[in-house]
Image (tube, rainbow, N blue to C red):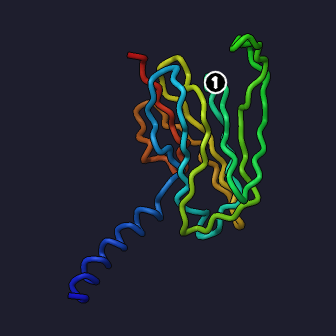
Amino acid sequence: MKKAISQLLIPAVSLLSGTVAHAHITLERSSFEAGTWNKLVLRVAEGCNGANTTSISVELPKGVYMPRPAPKAGWKLDVKREKLDKPVETHGMQITEAIRSATWSGGSLPDDFYEEFTVFARVPTEAGKYPIKVSQICEKGRVDWHEVAKPGQSRRELKAPAPELEVIPKQ
């Protein structure tokens, strides 16, 4: 019985190992209805060529409204704000700037562990595809997940694809 179980587990573990070795930073859920408030969860499934991840920087696309990155125990959270092209009125207040990027740093995510980094925000009101540029800094190395597929090109062809937020028309 033990031999039969181990014969089943070895190919399964090999298959999983192969998948994780080619993992990217992805969104847990990538498709949202236009103008809705959602939790954007970025999944980090590996380090940089075996090295621990020590920092994740996320650059949010224009149109993402009032982002709220979630603090993470053991990590320092820094945000950069940007002046809005035109002020937004909400709850009787005028908003003139918004968070455009968030960086979690100072932690250490081992290469063979998985973690999530979360931002709560309203997705753009216009349907379309919005790349989210992510920079992953590791103890040894860095990966900038910034590549965007050109028309007719598959995302699978890219070495470091940016996670992509797909906004569908409101129904």
Circle 1: residue type: Tyr
Quarter of the figure with residue 46: bottom right
* 144 or 17: nearer the viewer: 17
Which image quarter holds the C terminus? top left
Q: Which residue sits at x=64%, y=34%?
A: 60
* 93 or 22: nearer the viewer: 93
Q: Is residue 58 above or below residue 128?
A: below
104 left or right of 8 in image: right
- Expressed as whole percent of the image width and height from the top left, the position of residue 20 reads 45, 63
- Expressed as whole percent of the image width and height from the top left, the position of residue 53 reads 66, 61
Element under label 1? strand
Q: Which residue is mark 1?
A: 65
Q: Which residue sits at x=46%, y=30%?
A: 166
171 left or right of 106 in image: left
Q: How many marks?
A: 1
Q: Is residue 97 above or below residue 74?
A: above
- Expressed as whole percent of the image width and height from the top left, the position of residue 128 reads 48, 23
Q: Which residue sits at x=41%, y=41%?
A: 154
